[in-house]
Amino acid sequence: MGAVESFKIALDAFRVMQDLAGSAASAELNRRIAEAYAAVTTAYADAIELREENVNLKRQLADDSEQRALREALSREGDVYWLRPPPPGHHDGPFCMLCSDVDHKLVTVTEFTTHDSKPEWRCRKCNQYVPRRM
């Protein structure tokens, strides 16, 4: 049983105790039960917050792990990056070095032929042109 479920059980128990104490007409007992109920309610809210934070941190850790795996798979060839080998769900490239190094984004570059028929890579995000080595 998790912390949140335990708090729910405790809150239900306090509600029952408050009902029972109300019939006994004990002001001190009612006051103590109300204080305990307030403390458990606050702890319950804190537990829910912590659970949400934990989920977010786990998601962030998974994202960071994926990014690290991508960075480790990057291989520089000329002035572009390739994924060697590409992780599942990714193609091998080529990717813009500038976008990868500065923005930490894998942006695919496309083949482009200049007016003098020289092959180049072109990044559609940063508009960088890089000579394509054959």
Image (cartoon, rainbow, N blue to C red):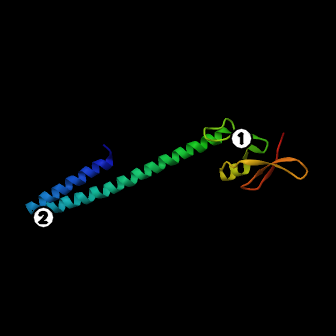
Q: Which mark is residue 9?
A: none
Tell me the crowding category of disc 1: few under 14, some 14 to 19, or many 20 or more residues within 10 angstroms, Cα based.
many
Q: Residue placed farthest to the top in the image?
A: 85
Q: Residue at x 27, y 58 (%)?
A: 39
Amino acid on which disc 2 is placed? Ala
Q: Secondary structure at mark 1?
A: strand
Q: Quadrant of residue 90?
A: top right
In front of the other: label 1 or label 2? 1
Q: Is residue 46 left or right of residue 26?
A: right
- Residue 43: percent from left, percent from top: 31, 55
- Which residue position holds label 2? 27
Real-space Cα separation, disc 1 to disc 2, in angstroms: 74 Å
- Residue 80: percent from left, percent from top: 75, 44
Number of disc labels: 2
- Residue 104: percent from left, percent from top: 65, 50
Q: Residue at x 28, y 48 (%)?
A: 6
Q: Quadrant of residue 34?
A: bottom left
Q: Residue at x 40, y 50 (%)?
A: 51
- Which residue position holds label 1? 82
Q: Quadrant of the C terminus?
A: top right
Q: Secondary structure at mark 2?
A: helix
- Residue 2: percent from left, percent from top: 32, 45
Q: Is residue 123 left or right of residue 45?
A: right
| Residues at discs 1 and 2 in contact (Cβ within 8 Å) | no
Q: Residue at x 76, y 48 (%)?
A: 110
Identify which residue, 9 or 46, lies in the foreground.
9
Tell me the crowding category of disc 2: few under 14, some 14 to 19, or many 20 or more residues within 10 angstroms, Cα based.
few
Amino acid on which disc 1 is placed? Trp
Whichever of callouts 1 and 2 sits on the residue coming sooner in the sequence is: 2
Q: Residue placed farthest to the right in the image?
A: 116
Q: Quadrant of the N terminus?
A: top left
